[in-house]
Image (cartoon, rainbow, N blue to C red):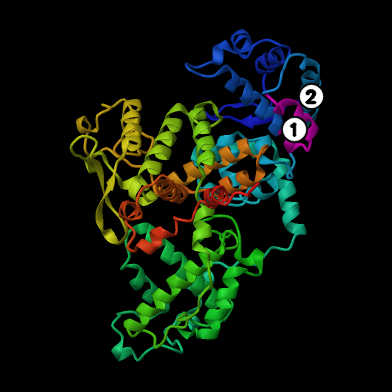
Amino acid sequence: MKQSHRIGQHGQTYVGFPDHASLAALRAWCEGLSARAAVERYLSHRRIQAQSSRGMLGRIRRRLIDIAQANGRDDLAAVFRDGNADHAGRGMPVHRAIEALRELQDREPQISDDLGLWLAPRASLPLKQMGVTTFAELTLRVPRRHHWWSEMVGIGPASAHRIEAFFSRYPSLTESARQLVERSQPTRRVVWRDVMAARSRDGSRGRYRAPRARCLLSVTTDREAIEAWLSLHEPATTSRTYRKEAERLLLWANVERKRALSSLNTSDAIAYRAFLRSPEPRDQWIGSRQTRLSDEWCPFFGRLSSSSVAYALSVLSALFRWLVEQQYVVANPFAGVSAGSTRATASICVRSLHDEEWQFARHVANDLSTQHGWSLEAAQRLRFILDFQLATGLRANELIHARIGDVIFGDAADNWLRVVGKGRRSARVALPPLAMQALQTYLHQRGLQADPRHCSRTLPLVPAFGQDHSVSISGTRLRTVLKRFFRLVAEQIRPTDSVVAHKLEQASPHWIRHTHATRALARGVELRSVRDNLRHASIATTSRYVHGDERLRMQQVSIAFAAEG
């Protein structure tokens, strides 16, 4: 029988279906043997120190589940799914399910196949995160473009070479993809070149340009004016966010309104607000994450939330307000254009985790190194990030720039962390016992002295993995790691609570900051103390967290006004 091949993590090719030793261990466990005994008998040569026997069997079961689901056989997936029930006596159903899956594997890959069925997670997961889920989508890139992988986050030259080798073994994939292209009508994507080439709408003759002699900027076009505004803003994360909003508007003005940004009026601003709420046509404006000069790039990755629309409008109003002050344009078309109530308090409640949700996530983190794709080193770093950010409420940008030398030691437990926050303002953040314990534990796990005072002051608190230990994790990588972790948590809780699972799928690094504030206030920390630790300019901002836990409010009011009799 011809077996399917899967791309390995070290360049080798190996069968995607679990091998005979793995299946023998699984069968033995299903027939009543303990997990430890089954692994010792059949897989002892693969076991690494501190690796869980149940974890090894769990990975085998998950692989079989993935194969079954990719082939539309949820009935077979169900046979392997329940690892907590009494497994003795299930040997025959498992044996039949394995043989059924073997028959499914006796074929070549099709363009409609899920990538996870044929490619290793190291290759398939980054592709799926960018919306590339099937060979029908992937083959449109690989055969046609040199260095196609350079536009894909998480895919490097080595993985790209192995994917290309896979296509070489199955040339029918490329041919099927070409036929698919010929049958389909390509979507006209909005591309950045539309703005770059539109000299007639570059703003040099914008309708609402102020007299040139009075302008304080040495610029000619709208793009140059935007660049001048962006140059004022630090840190880089703020500048990137502002650029995204400004360039989205610039592109929309050129493509949809056929005019320069400096020719927009209030009616245009109102129309843009409606467009932000529902970018149409969807195929033209919304797509997967790509580099801006890619043919597959789109300005939006999905529909914006109400708070995101409000934020975009506030950024654009600030841009035009500054352009008016510099006498580049005569008026601000976004003045007075609001998105209405964004229900900030409710939004914060949704974007923070309740105690039991956090405890469940932390429980998953404790066993993270047994999960596929998580090394012991990565699991240790993830646990430190969770505990340290929860205890301090740091912004993601503050966390990635923090170094050992920023820790300030005082008397007793009076410890602080020096940070540079928004507006380049320096401040001190309290380091409570949970933060110090997490830091000391993680330093020890990194092979350093547990006492930060005995470590190099230049070492980052959250390092990137590699030979240079002085390099901190990047903001993009931090977000990717946490998003991946919360998706794993979501999958584990989905069978019992699909609503919480959906919520966890949306979680990001900033959610931990929200969770810190909500928990601090719920546990009696004074509002002003929370404000100072979060470094909010106004206490009104911090007050949004006071009513964040609606369930707690309901419990307390219900106790106070219980039914009589």
The image shows residue 521 at horizontal and vertical percentages of 41, 49
Q: Looking at the image, is mark 2 or mark 1 earlier in the sequence?
A: 1
Up-down: is 288 above or below 456? below
SS state under label 2: helix
From the viewer's perspective, is 233 left or right of 108? left
**Residue bearing mark 1:** 68
Label for residue 422?
A: none
Residue 263 is situated, as x and y percent measured from the top left of the image, at: 48, 85
Counting other residues with Cα less than 10 Å from the Cα at mark 1, is it few (<14), some (14-19), or many (20 or more)?
many
Magenta span covers which residues?
67-83
Which kind of residue does numbered mark 1 sit on?
Answer: Ala
By secondary structure, the bulk of the magenta-drawn segment is best described as helix
The outermost residue toward the front is: 565
Q: State yes or no: discs 2 and 1 in contact (Cβ < 8 Å).
A: yes
Residue in the image at 59% along x and 35% along y: 121
Q: Is residue 282 above or below residue 457?
A: below
Residue 359 in percent (x, y) is at 51, 36
Q: Which residue is mark 2?
A: 97
Tag 2: amino acid: Ala
User: Which residue occupies the foreground of this view, 159 or 134?
Assistant: 134
Residue at x 43% of width, y 46% of height: 519
**Res. 532 image quadrant:** bottom left
Verify whether residue 333 appears in magenta.
no
Viewer-closest of 365 and 374: 365
Say if residue 238 shows up in the picture: yes
Q: Position of residue 109 (x, y in %)?
A: 73, 37
- Dot 2 alpha-carbon crowd within 10 angstroms: few under 14, some 14 to 19, many 20 or more: some
Q: At numbered mark 1, what does the secondary structure look like: helix, strand or loop?
A: helix
Whether residue 164 is visible: no
